[in-house]
Amino acid sequence: MQDVTEWRSVAAATGAADRAAAEEGVRRAYRDAGLAEPGRIVWADSPRSAVRAVRALTDPGRSVREEVRTRPWAEERRRAYDALGPAGWSARWSATGAQLWETTSALAERIRAGVVADLAPDEADEPAVRMVLLDAVLGQHDAAWLAAFEGGTGRLDGLARVARNAGWWWPFERTVVISERPEVLHRDEAGRLDHGEGPALAYRDGFALYAWRGMPVPAAFLGELATLTPERIREEENAELRRVMLEYYGYERYLAESGAQPVQQDEAGILWRIAMAEDEDVVMVEVVNSTPEPDGTHRTYWLRVPPATRTAREGVAWTFGLTGDAYVPVRQT
């Protein structure tokens, strides 16, 4: 069983597909499923373009996703489960696929949502687009499962070869549509889409997703972040976008420039509250590190605490999982 690191790299790969290798993987997957190789392979620049290409096909035959992906997938999982037992399979999954599942499944869902938003501006068109997306094999974004099945019977070698070399693909009896991988991918330390200066995910045909720390944002919104003011933040009606603005602008800077006043102070720090229209208040505790820096200064930290926090002591205690009464630090560091 190979290191999950390889499959993490596959899931995050960007740049042009190796088309020859991916096409050979497709043919291998068809042969392993007992199917005739497809007569035609169509390439698309993104999942969005691929959905358009699928909808434009005139005689592709029926979808063979069940034979190519679903059935061998289920058989390989059953084989591994029977060989390893419940505890062994759980350990295998924990050491491999579980480490990739959350980020890859979330990314795939964001791509689906983006494709639907672009191709079905009218709600009535959504079901048709979603049906096409259901026929997709996720290529590189199937990395979690492929990592768990690595070293099996070889039934999934074709699928793994496509995943290592291309993006999503649609298998039909006579035709296969394959998407290129993204050209750009930016994520934060938690694996969420995140970029403040452009698309967090982008394909060569212009299909792109914009996000700040995992939250979808409009493309035009990012261009405004560099010119934010406290007044503009307060005027934003969308509560989620307002929170993004605050994170980007900085709570400390916002407090200083908005003329906010502290609401409480004790030995633990200073409690600040930012009232947000039609949203919960932002409550912060200002804490000064008692341990000096090398230059003799003391660093100030800002701790986000629950809106119901009444005192700085209670807020600092909450960050340690304690109540205010139970928080008795020997020394603050």
Image (cartoon, rainbow, N blue to C red):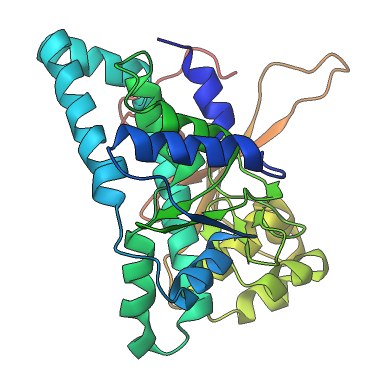
Q: Which of 194 and 176 is in front in this view?
A: 176
Q: Which of 200 and 147 is in front in this view?
A: 147
- Against 263, residue 225 (above or below) is below
Q: Nearer the viewer, residue 212 or 231?
A: 212
68 relative to 251 in the view: left or right: left
Q: Is residue 312 visible?
A: no
- Against 323, residue 241 (above or below) is below
Image point (51%, 37%), residue name: 162
Q: Position of residue 137 (x, y in %)?
A: 39, 49
**Would you identify the image quadrant in which residue 143 lies?**
top left
Image point (35%, 20%), residue name: 154
Quadrant containing the N terminus in the rendered view? top left
Image point (62%, 72%), residue name: 218
- Against 278, residue 7 (above or below) is above
Q: Which of 57 and 307 is in front in this view?
A: 57
**Would you identify the image quadrant in which residue 307 lies?**
bottom left
Q: Position of residue 168 (x, y in %)?
A: 49, 50
133 relative to 181 in the view: left or right: left
**Would you identify the image quadrant in which residue 35 lies?**
top left
- Against 247, residue 232 (above or below) is below
Q: Position of residue 322 (x, y in %)?
A: 32, 28
9 relative to 163 in the view: left or right: right
